[in-house]
Amino acid sequence: MLEVRPPYSARRYRYALDWRAQPADARPRLLGLAVAEAVDASRIELTAVPESPAAAGPGALPAASRTDATAVWSVAVIGAQRSFTAAAGVELAGGGVVSSRWLSPHLRVAIDLLAEGDTVVVVSGAIRVVSISAAPRVVYRLGTRAHADLGVAARAGVVQMRGEAPPGSALVGDQQVRAWFGPAATLAVGLDLTPRVALDVDLELGVVAFGATARDAGQPAAVLGGRWTSLGLAATLAL
C-alpha cells in the first residue's frame, strides 16, 4: 500500500500495489510511476476517490463511528442531593433530566429540570418540602474520553412547604409556595464508556439570591437560603 500526502494539503492519494507479484527489477519503476501519478493529480486539483473501510486496514473505524462521538444533542438522567448552609437549611434529594446542545467539540449549552424533596421533623409535626427547579448553563469541556466540564449557571425554582400536624393533634398545618433563585458554578468529571454513553459525577455550588423559609412556633425550621452544594451522578446519552 502506497500513500502520498502533498505538503500543506488535506488531500491524500493511496494506491494498492501488488509489490510481491512484480519482478524485483521492476519494483523501483512501479514505485516511481505511482509517485509521479500522485504528483500530477495534485497539480491539476484532482480529488482522490475515498477509500472503503476495508481498504483502510483492520481496526480502522468507519466515518460514521467517528461522527457519533460529536453528536449535536445529548440527554442525561441525573440523581442529586442538595444542601443549604443557612441555619435550619434543608437537605433536598431527587433527580431529573439534563438536555445539552454542543456548539463545538469543547463548548455546549445545557438546561436541567430537577424535582427534589425533604421532610423536616419539628416539635409540632413535620414540614414537607418539594422543589422544582431548572438551571440553564454554559459548559466548557477539557479532555475527550476522560473529561472535566466547567460551567456557569443560574438556578431558578419554585418550592412548596407544607406543615403536617401529628395524628390526633388540634394543630392545623399550613403551606406556602415561594420562588427561589441563585447563580451557580458547576464542575463535572466523567468517562465516555462508548462514543454515545458517558457517566459523570456533578458538583454544583451556588448562592441563594432570594429563597424561602418555613417556621415552627415562630422560629425558622426549614430554610432554602445561604449557599448550596449539590452532588449528583449522571448518565448521558448522545443523540
Image: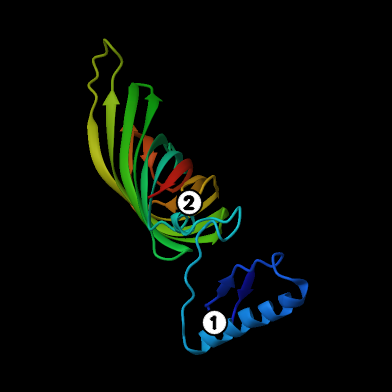
Q: Earlier in the sequence, mark 2 or mark 1?
A: 1
State left or right for residue 3 relative to residue 76.
Answer: right
Q: Residue at 39% across / 37% down in the picture?
A: 95
Q: Residue at 60% across / 67% down in the picture?
A: 16
Q: Which residue is mark 1?
A: 9
Quarter containing the N terminus: bottom right
Quick check: can you spot residue 7? no
Quick check: can you spot residue 141? yes
State left or right for residue 177 relative to residue 220.
Answer: left
State left or right for residue 194 relative to residue 209.
Answer: right
**Numbered circles on residues, count:** 2
| Spatial CA span between label 2 and label 1 | 47 Å
Q: Type of residue at label 1?
A: Ser
Observer-nearest of 216 and 60: 60
Q: Residue at 23% across / 15% down in the picture?
A: 170
- Rendering coords of residue 150 (x, y %): 50, 58
Are there few (<14), some (14-19), or many (20+) residues within 10 Å of tag 1? few
Q: Which residue is mark 2?
A: 205
